Image (spheres, grey):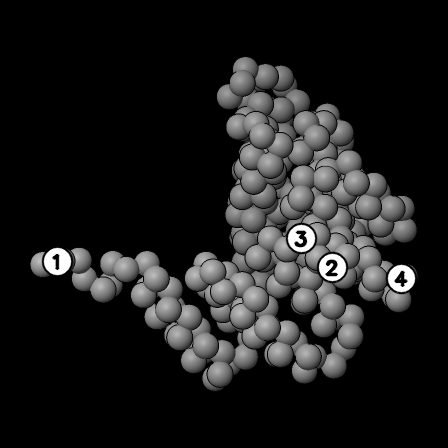
Amino acid sequence: MDNTTNSTDPGKKLLEDLNRHKQDFSRNPSMDNLFQIVVIYDALGQTERGLGFAEAFLMQVEDEMERIVLNTMVLSMVDRDDEAIELLGKAEKKFPEDIRLKRYRGMLLNKQGKFDEAVGAFDALLENEPDDLESVSGKIMALLGLRKNEQAMKAYQDSIGITPTEAPQWHFKGMIDGMMSECLLKMQQSGKDESREKKLAGSFDRISNLIDTFGPDVRDFYRMGQVAGKEAYHLTMNDTGKE
C-alpha cells in the first residue's frame, strides 16, 4: 500500500494553489494574483492556458500602453522573452516617446543576458533623464553582467547625489545599493581590499541606518529594493556563467 499522502503530491499542491489564487483573483483581481496564476499554469505544463487567462483579463485594461507593458511582463514571467521584446518593438514604433517601453525593453535585455544592448538602451534613456534611478539601476546591472565593475562603480557614485522625490523611487535607490553592496562584498572576499571599497562598504551601513528616519513608506520601498538588488546581482552573475 502506498503510504504517500496526497499533500506530498507536487501536482496536487499546485492545483490547490491555483484554485486558491483564482478564488482570490475573483474577489480581488490584482496583478499579483494574476501573475501567480500564470506562473502556476506554467509549472503545470499549461503555459498557453495561463497566457490565455491573462490575456482575457488584460483586454479590459483601457490604457493601451499599460496593457502592452503588462502583457510583456506576463510573457517574461514564463520565459517568453523573445515574444515580449517583439511586442515592445512594435509598441515603440507606435509610441516612440514613451519612456516606460524603452526602460522595460532594457530590463528584458538584462534578463536575456544581452548586457551590451542593455547598456546602450539605458544610456539613451539617461541622456534625456540623467536622474532616472530606474534606468541607472538597469545600467549598473548590465555593467556588472559585463564584469565592468569599475564602470558600474562610477555609475553608482554618480547616482549617490540623486534624491528621490517620491516614495516609490526609493525602491530603485535601494536596488542600486543592494547590487553594489553585494559586488563590494564579492570583491572583498576575493582579496580586493582597497581603501575605496572599504569606504563605500561602510557607507552602506550608514545609509541603512539613516533610511529608518525617513518614514515607513520610504523605508519599505528602499528595503524591498535592497533585497531585489541583491537577488538581481546574483542572478546576473549566474546569467554570465560565472559564480
Name which of mark 4 and mark 2 comes first in the sequence: 4
Q: Position of residue 129 (x, y in %)?
A: 86, 51
Instruction: Give how far apart the Cα atoms at labels 4 and 1 are.
Output: 59 Å
**Quarter of the image with the N terminus in it:** bottom left
Name the kind of residue labelled 2 in the image.
Thr
Q: Mark 2 highlights which residue?
A: 165
Residue situated in front as seen by the camera: 7 or 211? 7
Residue drawn at (72%, 39%) of the image:
114
Relative side of 102 to 53, left or right: right
**Which of the 4 image quadrants contains residue 120?**
top right
Bin the neighbour count of mark 4 within 10 Å (Cα to Cα): few under 14, some 14-19, many 20 and up. Answer: few
Name the kind of residue labelled 1 in the image.
Asn
Name which of mark 1 and mark 2 comes first in the sequence: 1
Q: Mark 1 highlights which residue?
A: 3
Label 4–label 2 contact, CB within 8 A:
no
Residue drawn at (58%, 17%) of the image:
193
> Which mark's residue is nearer the viewer, 1 or 2?
1
Q: What SS does tag 4 mark? A: helix
Name which of mark 4 and mark 1 comes first in the sequence: 1
Q: Mark 3 highlights which residue?
A: 81
Residue situated in front as seen by the camera: 15 or 48? 48
Name which of mark 3 and mark 1 comes first in the sequence: 1
